[in-house]
Image (cartoon, rainbow, N blue to C red):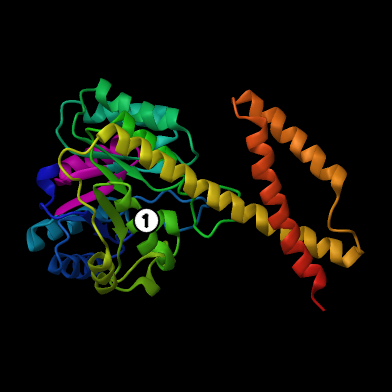
């Protein structure tokens, strides 16, 4: 797979969420080629949550990808979700395939696709499943390997969540780090477009992915994002993508580094990201409680409630081998910060 990319990191896969017309595909591809993108992506089939949404142009769009190959020299890549998609792509000469999050979540479909690719050398990138399930993600890789599909890579696009977060999908970087630890030999990409859900956050997610040592980025780019038939809010124009890529810092690995230690540090960093996010979420809830108490003239400090919370935390912590005194110190600091926030709210005129 490495031969599909130049020696400059990050490796880039870019193109529109969906192939919508020949003109749109070729206009976008030419602009992306101008600043060094070597693999062009475009969805031919689009799995959508609701019927009636644009579900892709279908096989009609495959010749457009052939035109991209011929006119720009770029490799082309699209998503497949069943064996018939695979056959159509192989017949059309598509260079690279990816397995989407919804498909990775279905072992029957993964098995079907793996069997249809048995004996081929087409690179296959496997996105994480919709939910944070390392077993499904790992199992998908194993199914391809069992069918002697060896040209594999991994894409982290975040996980569905009911929590209120700033992104479309929760990064949960620790799961990506764990997959990198399990499959260190495989190229690893991040899809910041689907993780962000908005162009506003693509740069920060991309930089975080590179800081964690990922090899490349799959980013959605459309010549006219405002007219896109799917995921318009997360697609950058080619010029905006060029500016974003130019702003990223790539931290090269230094020869002689302790890879095992670096891997453990990356896992710590990923867990710390989640800790900060959860603390912010907890503080938001504390502010909601502060407003509730203000409206009903309820005292800020509820000692019995806090003692109950501490007891539950110590009991749960014990099952994980955590020291009770350590947890008490942590929760006292969190409680003090929450009380201070609520006090600000109640003190406001």
Q: Does the magenta stretch include residue 77?
A: yes
Quadrant assignment, res 182: top left
Q: Is residue 346 above or below residue 63?
A: below
Identify which residue is drawn at 62% across, 29% down: 323
- Circle 1 sits in a helix, a strand or a loop, which is it? helix
On the rendered structure, is 123 left or right of 307? left
- The part of the chain drawn in magenta is 75-97
The residue closer to the viewer here, 241 or 291, is: 291
On the rendered structure, is 145 left or right of 283? left
Quadrant assignment, res 122: top left
Q: Where is residue 100 in the image (x, y as percent from the top left)?
A: 37, 43
Q: Which residue lies furthest to the top in this view?
A: 146
Q: In this view, does 253 lie above or below 326?
A: below
Q: Does the magenta stretch include residue 36?
A: no
Q: Position of residue 11 (x, y in %)?
A: 20, 52
The residue closer to the viewer here, 53 or 29, is: 29
Which residue position is annotated with label 1? 192
The residue closer to the viewer here, 23 or 349, is: 349
Q: Where is residue 345 in the image (x, y as percent from the top left)?
A: 77, 69
Q: Which residue lies furthest to the bottom in this view?
A: 349
Identify which residue is drawn at 24% across, 47% down: 215
Q: Where is residue 288 in the image (x, y as percent from the top left)?
A: 75, 60
Identify which residue is drawn at 51% across, 52% down: 51
């Amino acid at each position: 797979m490495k031969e599909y990319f130049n020696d400059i990191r990050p490796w880039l896969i870019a193109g529109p969420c969906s192939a919508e017309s020949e003109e749109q595909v070729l206009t976008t591809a030419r602009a992306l080629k101008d600043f060094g993108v070597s693999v062009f992506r475009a969805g031919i089939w689009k799995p959508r949550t609701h019927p009636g949404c644009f579900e892709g142009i279908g096989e009609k769009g495959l010749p457009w990808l052939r035109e991209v190959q011929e006119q720009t020299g770029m490799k082309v890549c699209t998503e497949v979700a069943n064996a018939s998609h695979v056959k159509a792509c192989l017949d059309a000469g598509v260079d690279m395939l990816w397995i989407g999050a919804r498909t990775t979540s279905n072992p029957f479909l993964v098995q079907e696709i793996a069997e249809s690719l048995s004996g081929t050398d087409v690179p296959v990138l496997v996105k994480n499943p919709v939910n944070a399930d390392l077993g499904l993600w790992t199992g998908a890789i194993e199914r391809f390997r069992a069918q002697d599909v060896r040209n594999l890579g991994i894409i982290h696009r975040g996980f569905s969540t009911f929590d209120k977060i700033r992104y479309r999908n929760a990064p949960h970087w620790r799961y990506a780090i764990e997959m990198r630890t399990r499959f260190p030999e495989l190229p690893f990409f991040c899809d910041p477009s689907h993780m962000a859900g908005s162009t506003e956050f693509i740069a920060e997610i991309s930089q975080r992915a590179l800081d964690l040592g990922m090899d490349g980025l799959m980013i959605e780019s459309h010549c006219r994002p405002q007219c896109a038939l799917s995921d318009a809010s997360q697609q950058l124009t080619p010029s905006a993508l060029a500016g974003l890529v130019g702003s990223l810092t790539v931290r090269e690995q230094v020869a002689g580094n302790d890879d095992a230690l670096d891997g453990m540090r990356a896992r710590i960093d990923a867990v710390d990201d989640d800790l900060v996010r959860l603390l912010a979420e907890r503080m938001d809830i504390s502010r909601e409680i502060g407003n509730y108490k203000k409206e009903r003239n309820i005292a800020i400090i509820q000692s019995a409630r806090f003692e109950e919370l501490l007891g539950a935390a110590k009991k749960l912590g014990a099952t994980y081998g955590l020291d009770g005194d350590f947890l008490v110190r942590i929760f006292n600091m969190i409680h003090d910060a929450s009380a201070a926030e609520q006090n600000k709210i109640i003190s406001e005129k």
